[in-house]
Amino acid sequence: MASGDLLIAGDLHVAEVWEKIKEEIPRKYNFLNPNKQLKKLISKVKKNEYLVLNGDLVDYYYSDYVPKKDRNNWALFYEIINNCKGETFLNLGNHDYRKYAWNFSIYGLEHVNISSSVRRKYGKQIGFHKFRFLGEIKCLWVNLNKFNSLKKFRHKRNYAVVIPGKDLVFLNTGPDAATRWGNYLKLNTLLPMYSDPPMTLGLNPLQLRLLKRTLKLGNRKECIVVIHAPAFFSLKKLEKVKVGWHSYSALKVKHKLNMGSFLFNGWLFLRTLIKSKRNIIVVSSHTHLPKQYILDKKTKTLWETRMSEINKYRNNSRYVKFVTTMAMGGIIEYSRKVGYLKISDEKIEHKVMKNFTHKYLLPLES
């Protein structure tokens, strides 16, 4: 029996403010509306397909600077995904813990393709432009008990499911690392050589136990591990390198494999994958930049690769395949495309929904 296709999208960044910006910014500007992109993806999902939304589902919890008891960005998010015809699975990202929006005058809006000059011009109409002084720190506040973003969802923060031909395990890499004050010592004082500090907390022993249990299940074709932040990631091209217990930290420094990665238990996560006999694919998001890596379990060798090699080794359990998705609701200078990852029985591929090669202004022909 052929299994339904798996569509995986990360970094959705749904927020009510995008609808406000759409009304305030003239149409000539090439505005990326994350809400619109998610609606487009939802419309593509067929009844026999599976949709995985891998973290940063919303941009922040509340829909405005002033908390609203009856409305937040999660209400809009669920409103959109409830139209999905296929089965939906959710995983949390670091943005999903953030209570308030960052000040757009500080953070900018380049991630939705609005230049700083346009933002200044329409700042008052858009909102989120007033400096709140120490109130800006609230953007990093986390209350795991109060802000249970998945309380309306049937699964918990970490869970495993079985679909035809595949096991799926969802591991939540947590909020921003900076939400724990003690981590500032680790990020800045103790590890000054890290030019790009780890951005999320990472995994805990209970999550690693869930991963081990899932990997010990039957001999199904694939086990797909879904995590928001990757265990390693680098902007620089990674040639073949050895990975080991003692070399993992040194490896991250030497090859700058820490961009966007998580803080705790990265090596234990990799070691769990290496020791398993299962055929494993790890899908992450968070970095907004699509990349692929392969880890040879036998030689403990890691290298960056193309999607063609991922598909070549797809059914070979000796290799762990790592794929990082492009973002659905945000762009960066290194990657101006938005889209999702499609996993079918035939192949794994990145699917581009829109390419923002024309910065800020719409192309003349439009």
Image: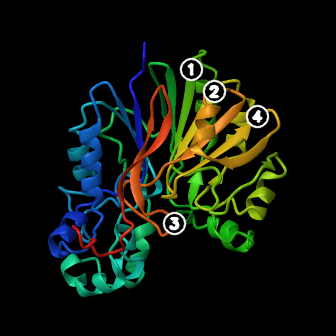
The residue wearing badge 3 is 334
For the residues marked 4 and 1, what is the alpha-carbon distance in whole angstroms? 18 Å
Instruction: Tell me if label 4 and label 2 are in contact, CB under 8 Å.
Output: no
> Mark 3 against mark 2, which lies toward the viewer?
3
- Horizontal arrangement in the rendering, residue 280 relative to residue 149 (left or right): right
Q: Amino acid at mark 3?
A: Tyr
Instruction: Tell me if label 3 and label 2 are in contact, CB under 8 Å.
Output: no
Label 2, secondary structure: give it: loop
Rate crowding at label 4 as few (under 14), some (14 to 19) or many (20 or more) other CA atoms within 10 Å: many
Q: First in sequence: mark 4 or mark 1?
A: 1
The residue wearing badge 2 is 279
Residue at x 27%, y 41% (from the top left corner): 42
Q: Amino acid at mark 4?
A: Lys
Q: First in sequence: mark 3 or mark 2?
A: 2
43 in relation to 353, above or below: above
Q: First in sequence: mark 3 or mark 4?
A: 4
Residue at x 72%, y 48% (from the top left corner): 303
**Residue 261 point in image, percent of width and height:** 61, 56
Rate crowding at label 3 as few (under 14), some (14 to 19) or many (20 or more) other CA atoms within 10 Å: few
**Residue 223 point in image, percent of width and height:** 56, 28
Residue 320 vs residue 206, the one in the foreground: 320
The colour scheme applied to this rendered structure is rainbow
Q: Tell me the quarter of the image containing the N terminus.
A: top left
Residue 297 badge = 4
Write down the quadrant of residue 276 in the picture. top right
Q: Amino acid at mark 2?
A: Asn
The residue wearing badge 1 is 221
For the residues marked 3 and 1, what is the alpha-carbon distance in whole angstroms? 34 Å
**Residue 143 point in image, percent of width and height:** 42, 56
**Residue occupying the far top of the picture:** 1
Rate crowding at label 2 as few (under 14), some (14 to 19) or many (20 or more) other CA atoms within 10 Å: many
Label 3, secondary structure: give it: loop
